[in-house]
Amino acid sequence: MSFLDGFSKNLGIDLGTANTLAYIKGKGIVINEPSIVAVDKKNDKVIAIGEEASEMLERTPKNIITIRPLKNGVIADFEITQMMLKYFIKKT
């Protein structure tokens, strides 16, 4: 299965530095969540994405970090951005 298999003409994604939005034709904006990913530094495992990761800001043990994978409108961390994008597409 290809990464792009989940796309259709009816889905639009806006990867923003602050928030990620997903739009579905006929439904409008169905996702508006922070562009943040929480990662466990010990094993590089993604712990949370979006709103859940945002709630973890400055409230986690030292081994868990929160990452904003987009900086100034540009993808700064491709792998984390890809994981975040997959998560939001599945959530729609």
Image (cartoon, rainbow, N blue to C red):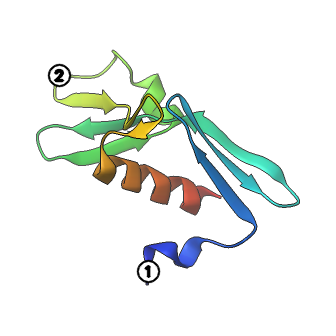
Up-down relation of residue 57 to residue 80 (above or below): above
In space, the residues marked 1 and 2 are separated at their CA atoms by 35 Å
Quarter holding the C terminus is bottom right
Q: Which residue is found at the position 68% from the left and 57% from the top?
A: 12
Q: Callout 1: helix, strand or loop?
A: loop
Up-down relation of residue 43 to residue 41 (above or below): below
User: What residue type is disc 2 on?
Assistant: Lys
- Residue carrying label 2: 62
Observer-side mark, 1 or 2, equals 1
Residue 58 placement (x, y as % from top left): 33, 15
Residue 37 placement (x, y as % from top left): 38, 38
As drawn, is 45 to the left or to the right of 35? Answer: left
Q: Quadrant of residue 90?
A: bottom right
Q: Which residue is found at the position 11% from the left and 40% from the top?
A: 42
Mark 1, other Cα within 10 Å: few <14 / some 14–19 / many ≥20: few
Which mark identifies residue 2? Answer: 1
Front-most of residues 54 and 17: 17
As drawn, is 82 to the left or to the right of 16? Answer: left
The extreme bottom residue here reads 1
User: What residue type is disc 1 on?
Assistant: Ser
